[in-house]
Amino acid sequence: MKISKLIYSLLTGLIMMGLFSCATIPKGAEAVKPFDKEKYLGKWYEIARLDFKFERNLNNTTASYSLNDNGTIKVDNQGYNTKKEEWTQAIGKAKFVGDDDIAKLKVSFFGPFYSGYNVIAIDKEYKYALVAGESLKYLWILSRETEIPEDVKNEYLKMAEKIGYNTSELIWVEHTKQD
């Protein structure tokens, strides 16, 4: 009886750890350090992404980041759903996994469930960013404007491929509508 309770407790603990924690960065990727969270705040245009359920059929996608009173970062994602012909919005929060000068965060749109959000490349002016999720299924190229210079794009694609991303699967986002 004691052994089954112990096994049950261990299994419950492992399941809970799996639900409330996450592998936050793909193997081979490194979060930017030093990172200036103040310079990262504001509006970013999604230039490219790997497709996934929550952004499927979206174009004109943006992410806006601002500080919450409790020190977390408010995440306001918006996009135009081309199938439903309507704007969608998702509000979440992000927090640093460790020190806030390392661009390794976790983001949540659904209560206690977090996913990795890691800025793995950024230019000096904080105009262009390459963001890795928790695995090779999630990747974003972001810009402060609706386009990105070809040399920056190529540099970020090479970086992503070196880590193991299949960049041929990227969706190149159009920015043709205003919200």
Image (cartoon, grey):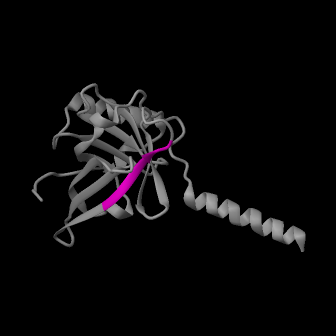
User: Is residue 170 something that shows in the picture?
Assistant: no
Quadrant in which residue 6 is drawn: bottom right
Q: Quadrant of the C terminus?
A: bottom left
Which residue is depicted at the point 63% across and 58% down? 17
Give the dominant element type of the magenta stretch: helix, strand or loop: strand
What is the total number of numbered labels drawn onto the structure image?
Answer: 0
Horizontal placement of 160 versus 11: left or right? left
- Does residue 60 sit above or below 82 in this rendering? above
Q: What x and y, as percent, mark residue 124?
A: 28, 25
Is 86 covered by the magenta stretch? Answer: no
Magenta residue span:
91-97
Which residue is depicted at the point 35% across and 58% down? 92
Taking depth in this image into account, of 75 and 145 the one nearest to the observer is 75
Q: What x and y, as percent, mark residue 99?
A: 48, 35
- Does residue 52 sit above or below 97 in this rendering? below
User: Is residue 53 something that shows in the picture?
Assistant: yes
Residue at the front extreme? 69
Taking depth in this image into account, of 52 and 113 the one nearest to the observer is 113
Taking depth in this image into account, of 99 and 78 the one nearest to the observer is 99
Which residue is depicted at the point 29% across and 32% down? 154
Horizontal placement of 39 versus 50: left or right? left
Q: What x and y, as percent, mark residue 91?
A: 31, 60
Quadrant in which residue 79 is drawn: bottom left
Q: What x and y, as percent, mark residue 98?
A: 51, 39
Horizontal placement of 14 versus 81: left or right? right
Which residue is depicted at the point 41% across and 27% down? 34
Q: Quadrant of the N terminus?
A: bottom right
Taking depth in this image into account, of 9 and 115 the one nearest to the observer is 9
